[in-house]
Image: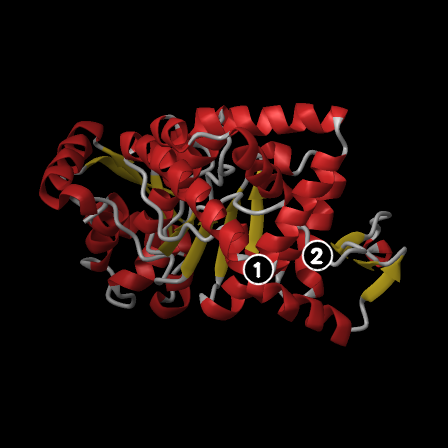
Amino acid sequence: MNTKELIASELASVIDSLDQEAILNLLETPKNSEMGDIAFPAFSLAKVERKAPQMIAADIAEKINSQAFEKVVATGPYVNFFLDKSAISAQVLQNVITEKEHYADQTIGKQENVVIDMSSPNIAKPFSIGHLRSTVIGDSLSHIFQKIGYQTVKVNHLGDWGKQFGMLIVAYKKWGSEEAIKAHPIDELLKLYVRINAEAEKDPSLDEEAREWFRKLENGDEEALALWQWFRDESLVEFNRLYNELQVEFDSYNGEAFYNDKMDAVVDILAEKGLLVESEGAQVVNLEKYGIEHPALIKKSDGATLYITRDLAAALYRKTNTNLLNLSTSLAKNNLPTSNNSRQYYKRWATIGVKTLSMFHLDW
């Protein structure tokens, strides 16, 4: 029994016209701490008892006698409770010992779903301080939401797709070592990525070769997919080592790649709504009516997809498959560097029917 429940119980023992739950809902915290810790307003009893609220409050205060309270006084129409801090502290400690991990559990969430999008490192790249912050904040939010009665789904939306994998495949085929990558996956893959980018500045044909390999990857080429899966698996070995040290677990590692076959649904929805516009061979959505100058690029002129497209597919998938009533999005600040980008982020969701009132971006 918490403090408010104790007060409601004491009040219910001397008030005939209200039950304990009704009393609990009426309890207030005084704006001025000098007026007490908890207050009960007697207004609702005036009609039933045919007395002024001030008189009712005075009568109730006289009848309350509990060692949990330092004093109980009537101030106007309020019954003000001053807690005995020593007695309450002892009771709290006893409750903690008795209830253990369930101490202070609440049912505010009513088992509604909350998805927490957190951590989200990039495959073949180091786990940064930004990823660490997002991981810790997201995990903390998960514990808080669970404590107050929500069902949480922790999603590690991995950065596991994009042209960079075309670059990595080219680099691995030219200079890579399977043994070195297995020994130090992130370090070796990063070295390859840095080298291929440096070489591509001197030899533009490498850039085109990388684009071709990424096209193969998108089209399901067996060799390209096998290398991509290996890079992903080796990176996750290292990431999971860190997560184990942090004692953080995830319900889903579905990253960008998971939504490759789900993007057509997004494009179809945008087309059906008449929102897709062709611009220099690319497909975009005009966001001017939302006060956003720059359009959202959905598909490039060569048919390649973008992070935006996959992000929309992820939002739609979660809406239709997780039956979300709430969505908490914990993102790295550098993913949304300006307020304009943050606004565009939510307006993209709105175009496919995902209510952004159920989402928030945690900025830090």
Left or right: where 307 falls relative to 70:
right
The local secondary structure at tag 2 comes to: helix
Q: Secondary structure at mark 1?
A: helix
Residue for point 73% across, 49% down: 344
Residue linked to disc 1: 260
Identified at 49% across, 26% down, the residue is 128
**Separation of disc 2 and disc 1 at Cα?**
18 Å
Residue 261's quadrant in the figure? bottom right
Q: Residues within 10 Å of mark 1 (few under 14, many from 20)?
A: some
**Residue 11: quarter of image:** bottom left
Residue at the extreme front: 174
Asked whether, in this view, residue 228 is left or right of residue 291, the answer is left
Residue 107: x and y, percent?
32, 57
Amino acid bearing label 1 = Asn
The residue shown at (40%, 33%) is 178
Report the residue at 58% width, 29% height from top: 193
Task: Please say whether residue 99 is visible from this viewpoint.
Answer: yes
Above or below for 23 versus 3: below
